[in-house]
Image (spheres, rainbow, N blue to C red):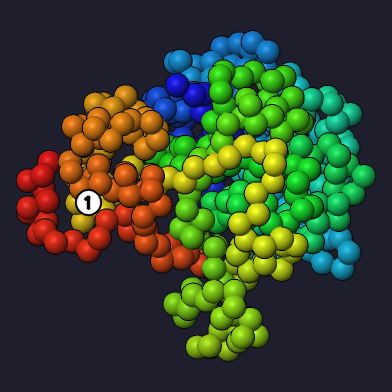
């Protein structure tokens, strides 16, 4: 089976993050999900950094281990600064080749923000200057703009981002090897802009709770180490980096334009016809990812570049089970059935991506197996997310069974 990696997560030291985001829970859920490698997240936070030092074994060529799961050192930072007449707010993922290098990074970044205040610290530091300073520590440090299209905190965000990577990173742009597409966009949307052809696109969960690990991830042909990751990203090697695992971008919480307070969701065309104003209250709507892509794209929808990893869209298994049961994904009934399925089918990724149709119908309730196959075939209905509200996905047709009858299917 392929080697799946999720490089962007957070620890319990980040704001709005579950207290269960500790090493023990991360390894347990990674195994359940079928994730072979995790980014540590938050290595800039002093308490989490101390836990990483005491908990992880290694390194071996930049990779650490714990309970059968591999780790690479990562941290997300929030660069907030004034440039070219606007306040810029850009989130970046930093990859470090080892703990000693991470310690040097922390010493440097502590001059620009309080690292102990949040697992994702705010830095008064320009992105281009940060990359230059990090490269002086070690040229193998990677910087990846995270959730690149999110309106409020990203390199291309409609509220405080830039119109090109070069505007953001200036002469340091050649050192940026990859960009994270984020939940509200997929590679196909990014392929529409030729300026991004130079970058390898990656996808990660940005998980704030263990159950969200792997909702987006990266699939490699075989186990990778840190030097291999750098080389794969540099060369856009689609023989070793096979594909990314993607949300349906409509499910992301910033896909369409909208105004959450008024319950208004608008397609880019509808928003443009209304001068980007909310038709209910008259205030400006939050311009979503799809609209922003339309603004910057120089290719028609459907363009596919020659050399690039591919992608596969999934809906998390818990959501599929919830859809089949007519319950919330957090309900006890859904969680019980979820655990039963992954026990029978090894892990969630095997169920979603690799198990045969016969295995699915043998090991899952009929409607769950039907839902998984619908997702594989793209046969889903989605109400797009907007202005911080996740979209709603339906993987099954309207319920034709009472809940009591559905439970009997289990």
Give the residue number, with chain letter if any, for mark 1: 324
- Is 338 left, or right, of 203 in this rendering? left
Residue located at (60% from left, 52% from top): 188
- Is 83 left, or right, of 150 in this rendering? right
Q: Is residue 187 visible?
A: yes
Label 1 sits on a secondary structure element that is helix
Looking at the image, which is closer to me, 263 or 80? 263
Q: Position of residue 318 (x, y in %)?
A: 31, 44
Relative to 368, does residue 59 appear above or below in the rendering? above
Residue located at (46% from left, 58% from top): 251
Q: Position of residue 275 (x, y in %)?
A: 65, 85
Q: How many marks?
A: 1
Q: Residues within 10 Å of mark 1 (few under 14, many from 20)?
A: many
Q: Is residue 207 visible?
A: no
Looking at the image, which is closer to me, 298 or 163? 298
* Quarter of the figure that contains the C terminus: top left
Residue located at (47% from left, 64% from top): 385
Q: Position of residue 182 (x, y in %)?
A: 59, 50
Residue located at (64% from left, 10% from top): 60
- Most distant residue in the right direction: 171
Q: Quadrant of residue 139?
A: top right
Looking at the image, which is closer to me, 197 or 66? 197
- Is 91 left, or right, of 206 in this rendering? right
Relative to 316, does residue 232 appear above or below in the rendering? above
* Quarter of the figure that contains the N terminus: top left
Q: Position of residue 262 (x, y in %)?
A: 47, 80
């Amino acid at each position: 089976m392929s080697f799946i990696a999720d490089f962007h997560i957070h620890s319990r030291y980040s704001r709005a993050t579950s207290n269960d985001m500790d090493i023990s829970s991360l390894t347990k859920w990674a195994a359940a999900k079928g994730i072979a490698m995790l980014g540590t997240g938050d290595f800039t936070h002093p308490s989490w950094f101390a836990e990483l030092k005491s908990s992880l074994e290694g390194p071996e060529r930049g990779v650490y281990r714990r309970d059968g799961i591999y780790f690479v050192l990562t941290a997300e930072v929030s660069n907030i600064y004034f440039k070219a007449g606007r306040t810029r707010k850009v989130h970046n993922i930093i990859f470090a080749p080892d703990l000693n290098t991470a310690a040097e990074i922390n010493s440097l970044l502590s001059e620009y923000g309080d690292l102990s205040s949040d697992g994702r610290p705010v830095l008064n530091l320009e992105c281009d200057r940060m990359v230059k300073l990090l490269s002086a520590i070690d040229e193998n440090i990677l910087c990846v703009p995270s959730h690149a299209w999110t309106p409020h905190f990203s390199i291309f965000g409609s509220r405080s981002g830039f119109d090109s990577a070069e505007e953001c990173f200036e002469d340091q742009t050649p050192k940026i090897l990859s960009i994270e597409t984020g939940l509200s966009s997929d590679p196909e949307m990014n392929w529409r802009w030729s300026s991004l052809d130079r970058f390898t696109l990656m996808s990660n969960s940005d998980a704030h709770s263990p159950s969200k690990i792997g909702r987006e991830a990266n699939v490699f042909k075989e186990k990778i180490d840190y030097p291999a990751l750098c080389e794969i990203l540099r060369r856009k090697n689609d023989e070793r980096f096979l594909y990314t695992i993607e949300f349906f971008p409509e499910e992301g919480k910033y896909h369409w334009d909208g105004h959450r307070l008024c319950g208004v969701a608008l397609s880019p065309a509808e928003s443009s016809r209304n001068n980007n104003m909310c038709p209910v209250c008259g205030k400006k709507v939050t311009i979503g990812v799809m609209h922003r892509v339309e603004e910057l794209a120089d290719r028609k929808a459907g363009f596919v570049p020659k050399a690039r990893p591919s992608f596969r869209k999934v809906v998390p298994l818990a959501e599929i089970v919830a859809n089949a049961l007519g319950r919330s994904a957090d309900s006890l009934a859904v969680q019980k059935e979820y655990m039963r399925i992954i026990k029978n089918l090894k892990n969630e990724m095997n169920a979603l991506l690799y198990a045969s149709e016969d295995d699915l119908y043998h090991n899952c309730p009929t409607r769950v197996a039907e839902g998984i196959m619908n997702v594989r075939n793209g046969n889903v209905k989605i109400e797009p997310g907007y202005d911080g509200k996740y979209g709603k996905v339906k993987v099954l047709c309207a319920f034709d069974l009472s809940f009591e009858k559905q439970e009997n299917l289990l």
